[in-house]
Image (tube, rainbow, N blue to C red):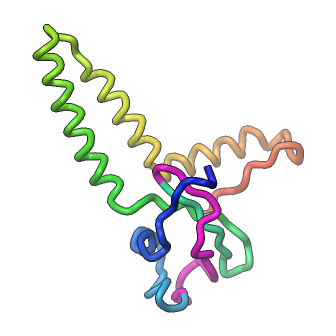
């Protein structure tokens, strides 16, 4: 939802720096070797795992940049370790009632949600599969 709380740009900038050549942005202008000319510091949407910023490529194309929240992978690893421990305790206390399958399924699906490369692959497949419906259906192209 676009009403979800978001992280300040200074907090998510390190995640962007890992993926792109931003230089010292946001403290200074974007590095000229960066594919982006400009990134809006306030996100246009945010959710529990990421937020989206409007940006402009060097050629003037407007794009959306999806940024995963910092430390999310580490936090989830810790959370799922706790879930597995609680699941083991429940199994022991409840005469073998095993929740491990549910915990494993949840972890697999959450990790899939965090794989933005896979999401981009799926978007490209969707664009290809729905191309025959254009212009009624538009799937924005993925920029990697």
Point out the residue furthest to the right here.
Answer: 135
Foreground of the two, 88 or 23: 88
The quadrant in which residue 52 appears is bottom right
Q: Is residue 18 visible?
A: no
Residue at 29% across / 51% down in the picture?
A: 75
**Residue 67 x %, y %:** 50, 62
Name the quadrant of the C terminus.
Answer: bottom right
Q: Is residue 68 above or below residue 76?
A: below
In the picture shown, does residue 86 fall above or below 7?
above
In the foreground, 82 or 32: 82
> Which residue range is magenta in the image?
30-49
Q: Give how far across and how far down residue 138 sits, in percent.
A: 80, 48
Task: Judge whether residue 98 is colored magenta.
Answer: no
**Which residue is depicted at the point 46% across and 43% down?**
113
Residue 58 position, x and y percent, is 66, 81
At a point 67% along the width and 75% down the height, the residue shown is 56
Residue 112 seen in this snapshot: yes
Q: Position of residue 133 (x, y in %)?
A: 85, 39
Give the image quarter of residue 137: top right
> Image point 44% across, 76% down: which residue?
10
């Amino acid at each position: 939802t676009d009403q979800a709380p978001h992280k300040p740009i200074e907090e998510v900038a390190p995640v962007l720096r890992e993926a792109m050549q931003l230089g010292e942005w946001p403290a200074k202008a974007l590095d000229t070797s960066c594919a982006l000319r400009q990134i809006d510091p306030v996100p246009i949407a945010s959710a529990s795992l990421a937020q989206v910023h409007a940006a402009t490529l060097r050629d003037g194309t407007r794009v959306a940049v999806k940024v995963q929240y910092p430390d999310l992978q580490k936090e989830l690893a810790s959370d799922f370790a706790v879930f597995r421990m609680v699941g083991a305790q429940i199994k022991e206390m409840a005469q073998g009632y095993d929740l491990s399958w549910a915990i494993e399924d949840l972890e697999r699906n959450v990790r899939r949600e965090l794989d933005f490369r896979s999401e981009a692959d799926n978007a490209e497949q969707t664009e290809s599969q729905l191309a025959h419906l254009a212009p009624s259906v538009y799937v924005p192209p993925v920029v990697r």
